[in-house]
Image (cartoon, coloured by chain):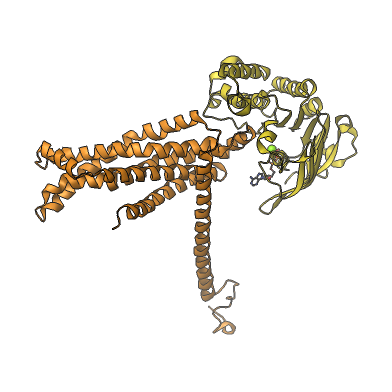
Chain colours: A yellow, B orange
Amino acid sequence: MIELRDIHKSFGSKHVLRGVDLHVEKGTSMVVIGGSGTGKSVTIRTVLGLVRPDRGQILVDGQDVTLADRDSFLARFGMLFQAGALFDSMPVWQNVAFRLLRGSLRRPREEARAIAIEKLRRVGLKPDVAELYPAELSGGMQKRVALARAIAAEPEIIFFDEPTAGLDPIMSGVINDLIREIVTDMGATTITITHDMTSVRTIADNVAMLHDGIIQWTGPVSRLDHSGNPYLDQFVHGRADGPIEAIR
Amino acid sequence: MTGPGAAGAAPKGTEDGRPGPARRLLAWLMAALASVGRSSLHLLASVGQVAIYAGLTVTHMVRPPFYGREFLNALLTIGYFSLPVVGLTALFTGGALALQIYAGGARFSAEAVVPSIVAIGMVRELGPVLGGLMVAGRVAASIAAEIGTMKVTEQIDALVTLSTDPMKYLTVPRVLAATLALPVLVGVGDAIGILGGYLVGITTLDFNAAAYLKNTVDFLETWDVVSGLIKGAAFGFIVALMGCFHGMRSGRGARGVGRATIDAVVSASILILAANFLLTNLFFAA
Ligand SMILES: Nc1ncnc2c1ncn2[C@@H]1O[C@H](COP(=O)(O)OP(=O)(O)OP(=O)(O)O)[C@@H](O)[C@H]1O
Ligand SMILES: [Mg+2]
């Protein structure tokens, strides 16, 4: 279980998070939605310790993350970065198998390679992509490689930052189904950030909407369309007028 | 221009609301002083940060995990691929040195010192310093640009989430490789520099080949060479450390990476010259 309590974060004079409270039950899929620049990426980065919150507490399985042993803590996580963040100095398969080639999860090289190729297949990439370098791939292919890397070591908790941004509708469908499957079949706990309402409906057990630095609404995906929350309503229906200003 | 009411009140604002010249000068002076103070504080803070970073690097060197593959890669890019640059620098420097010492020595009929002074000058001073500076330009820049780009594109964050300490994975292999590679590069540079002097000596300065070599070997002491190699190791440490330090601190975007690259080369060069002075003092001051 992941719990964020009253998280605050400013960059200079910009107060991005103003008291975020978020609850993700074990084995469920949480989708975080919200306008561009509202702090969704920052929120999941705080959980991983990549951004230090100014105030507030983050608990994973009841334990404060700042007190946890960093190595064993991170070993439980997978993360898909919004921009992919592939290592451009190594071929695709070594990117995917990065965790399996070193550290506590280390396997023989051939085995790691086979797992990488299998994960690539699951994100819709052919085996011959394995030997290419990230710079030789299209943006959407890079994103899928990054996704394969996030799930390669089969972590318990996975964060996906816009997994379907930049993908065609068919590939988006494949990725949405994959994420759903990871939660249902493998029992992983996931937080997904997305702007795509189709993804929300496929992936989510629960939805949280971030705006003005706080979670404005959170609830099961079934209540998405009749939440009665003006922020969520405007967002779900993509209306220009409402409480959310277009310029921010 | 100034109205009668404003007479004798230069520091006050003029009628159009802009500050008067005296006040503007004062403001400018204050700003200049503040900027000097700020950059001094900034410099001190940076020195502290570099010291802490160096300490961390050294402590990480002796604690597992070790990344052998990264180390060998770094050894290849830092050491092997720097050979041409260092070799050519040494060759020309040795040649020029022979010409200069010959010309200088001729003023008091001491042309015969050319071989020994070229050798001593190369191995004690010019080999390590010029080698270090050339490698600073090449290696500190490339390390800073590479790590800076990784920082900007979130690859460093990705490393962390993949349970890999960037300090151990990126910094330690590079610093270790540079520290070990530079003495070798300096040794090769020394030999090529002496060769440069020798070639000039026997072709244009009418030295006897055998006599030149005998003079070189006779006057060169082991400590001359060893002290230069120790300097090389220190400079290698500085070069890679500055590359990593500034790369890791790189600001956002391409601008940030460019800035980090410049900072790495400049600070590595200055630190090499400062460290050279200190080490020379330590080794040779009477
Ligand atoms: N390292 C940083 N330094 C300064 N400001 C930052 C930093 N990281 C994020 N911000 C700021 O925090 C705000 C939230 O950024 P974040 O990346 O979380 O947005 P987001 O909700 O993920 O948006 P998008 O949907 O466009 O990805 C932005 O205004 C951004 O400028
Ligand atoms: Mg984002």
Does B29 appear above or below B102? below
Relative to A7, residue B18 above or below = below
Q: Position of residue A160 (x, y in %)?
A: 71, 31
Residue B122 image position (x, y, % from top left): 25, 44
Q: Position of residue A156 (x, y in %)?
A: 74, 28
Apparent side of residue A138 relative to residue B225 in the rendered image (left or right):
right
Image point 54% across, 23% down: which residue? A91
Q: Quadrant of residue B83?
A: top left
Q: Is residue B119 left or right of residue A167?
A: left
Give the residue displayed 17% in from the left and 39% down from the top.
B198
Which image quarter has ligand 2?
Answer: top right
Percent position (x, y) of residue B46? 51, 54
**Residue B235, image quadrant:** top left
Of residues B220 and B167, the one drawn nearer to the viewer in this rendering: B220
Q: Is residue B8 above or below residue B246?
A: below
Q: Is residue A247 left or right of residue B109?
A: right
Using the rendered image of the protein, determine whether residue A78 is visible from the camera's viewpoint.
no
Asked whether B92 or A243 is in front, the reply is: B92
- In the image, B27: left or right of B218? right
Rendered image quadrant of residue B156: top right
**How many marks do you count on the picture?**
0
The answer to whether residue B200 shows anywhere in this view is: yes
Front in this rendered view, residue B28 or B108: B108
**Figure quadrant of the C terminus of chain B:** bottom left
